[in-house]
Amino acid sequence: MSDQCVFCGIVAGDLPSVRVAEDDTTYAFMDINPASEGHLLVVPKRHSRDLVDIEPDDLAAVTLAAQRIARTAVKEFGADGVNLLNCCGADAWQTVFHFHLHVIPRYADKSRERLAAPWQPGVPGDMDVIAALGHRLAAALD
Ligand code: 5GP
Ligand code: ZN
C-alpha cells in the first residue's frame, strides 16, 4: 500500500468507488471519467506502479478478472465490442501510477462512447525499420 496512491485508497475503502467485483487479489470499479458506457478499471490489491513493475501473478489475476468482467459487460450492456487498455508511463498516457487495466465496452452507436483510434490503422511503416527493430528485440529476448 502506498500512502500517496489513490487506487490503494480505493482498494482499502478509504476513498469511495463504485465497486463492480473483487477477489483476494483484484478489485474492479467504475471509472469516473468514462470513455464509454460501462468503462471500468481492474487493479491488483497489492500496489505496483505499472506493467514493468507488476508481479506476474498479479498481472495474471488482473487479466483474468478483466476478461470475466468484459464478457459480462458486453452481454449486460449490449456492447458490440470491448477494448482492454493499459497505459505504462506518462508518455503512454498513464496518469495514475498503480497498475490498472481499463475495460472499455464499445458500441456501434457512437452516442454511447467517445473514443477515437490512437493511431492511423492501415498506414504502412518503413519495412527496413520494422524488420531492424523486430530483429533487435528478438535478439534481446534470447
Ligand atoms: P490512466 O490514464 O492512468 O491509464 O487511467 C487512469 C484512470 O483512472 C482514468 O481513466 C481516470 O478517469 C481514472 N481515475 C482517476 N482518479 C480516479 C478516482 O478517484 N476514481 C475513479 N473511479 N477513477 C479515477
Ligand atoms: Zn497503489
Image: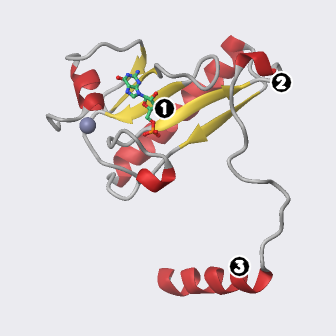
Q: Is residue 95 depicted above or below 51 in this figure?
A: above
Given residues 115 and 28, the one toward you in this image is 115
Q: Which mark is residue 108?
A: 2
> Mark 3 near mark 1, Cβ–Cβ under 8 Å?
no
User: Is residue 53 rendered to the left or right of residue 119?
Assistant: left
Q: Earlier in the sequence, mark 2 or mark 1?
A: 1
Q: Quadrant of the N terminus?
A: top left
Residue furthest left as drawn: 3
Which residue does the image show at 75% across and 15% down from the upper left? 78
Determine the image quadrant of residue 29.
top left
Q: CA distance from mark 3 to mark 1?
A: 33 Å
Q: Is residue 36 depicted above or below 4 in this figure?
A: above
Q: CA distance from mark 3 to mark 2?
A: 33 Å
Which residue does the image show at 50% across and 53% down from the upper left? 92
Q: Please state the horizontal and vertical placement of residue 103, each as a whole percent of the image.
A: 56, 31
Q: Amino acid at mark 2?
A: Ala
Given residues 130 and 62, the one toward you in this image is 130
Determine the image quadrant of residue 81.
top right
Q: Nearer the viewer, mark 2 or mark 1?
A: 2
Q: Is residue 15 depicted above or below 25 in this figure?
A: above
Question: Pointer 1: what residue?
Answer: 65
Q: Please state the horizontal and vertical placement of residue 90, each as a whole percent of the image.
A: 41, 51
Ligand 1 near label 1 (Cβ, under 8 Å)? no
Determine the image quadrant of residue 133.
bottom right
The residue tagged with tag 1: helix, strand or loop? helix
Are there few (<14), some (14-19), or many (20+) residues within 10 Å of tag 2?
Answer: few
Q: Amino acid at mark 1?
A: Ala
Q: Amino acid at mark 3?
A: Ile
Ligand 1 image-quadrant field: top left
Question: Pointer 3: what residue?
Answer: 130
> Mark 3 near mark 2, Cβ–Cβ under 8 Å?
no
